[in-house]
Amino acid sequence: MRCERAARYATLKLAGLEEAPGHLAVFADKASDLGYGLGRATMPETIEYSVAAAICCMWLAARAEGIGLGWVSILNPDRIHEILEVPEPWKFIGYLCVGYPQVEFDRPELERANWEHRRTSKEFTLRR
């Protein structure tokens, strides 16, 4: 099963890295004193959550304008730090490819490639 999945993954295109006109590396500045650390004393990971939420908002806004955004998740964070020479306390959150899609699809690429399938909300929602 693992080999089959690995072979299928190898066939997926990562064209965004080559074709997208815009690339954006996103980091969370863990040393920032903005907000005077509000919330971080009890939940230090909130800074990363805030950055992820900002990416989601950007993604939705881009799609509303017909702009595509892809989150590349196969990059080595240490290598990204080295290449971009960012300050040590910055935590790499994501690498985004941005541009106008050449083709619009009715389903995400990983679903079209049978890598994953959509689930109903009942499959991952717990109600009490």
Image: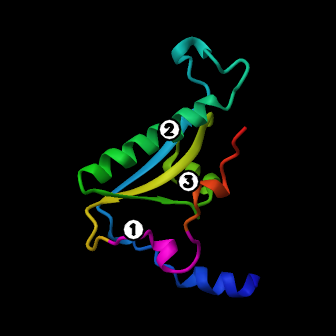
Gap between marks 2 and 1, in whole Å? 22 Å
Q: Which mark is residue 25?
A: none
- Residue closer to the observer: 93 or 108: 108
Q: Amino acid at mark 2?
A: Ala
Q: Which residue position is annotated with label 3?
A: 80
Q: Residue at x 44, y 68 (%)?
A: 108
Gap between marks 3 and 1, in whole Å? 17 Å
Residue 105 spot, x, y in % from top left: 34, 72
Quadrant of the rendered image containing residue 106: bottom left
- Residue closer to the observer: 18 or 7: 7
N-term mark: 2 or 1: 1
Residue 29 spot, x, y in % from top left: 56, 31
Q: Which mark is residue 16?
A: 1
Q: Which residue position is annotated with label 2?
A: 53
Q: Amino acid at mark 3?
A: Ile
Q: Which residues are magenta?
A: 105-117
Which secondary structure, mark 1?
helix
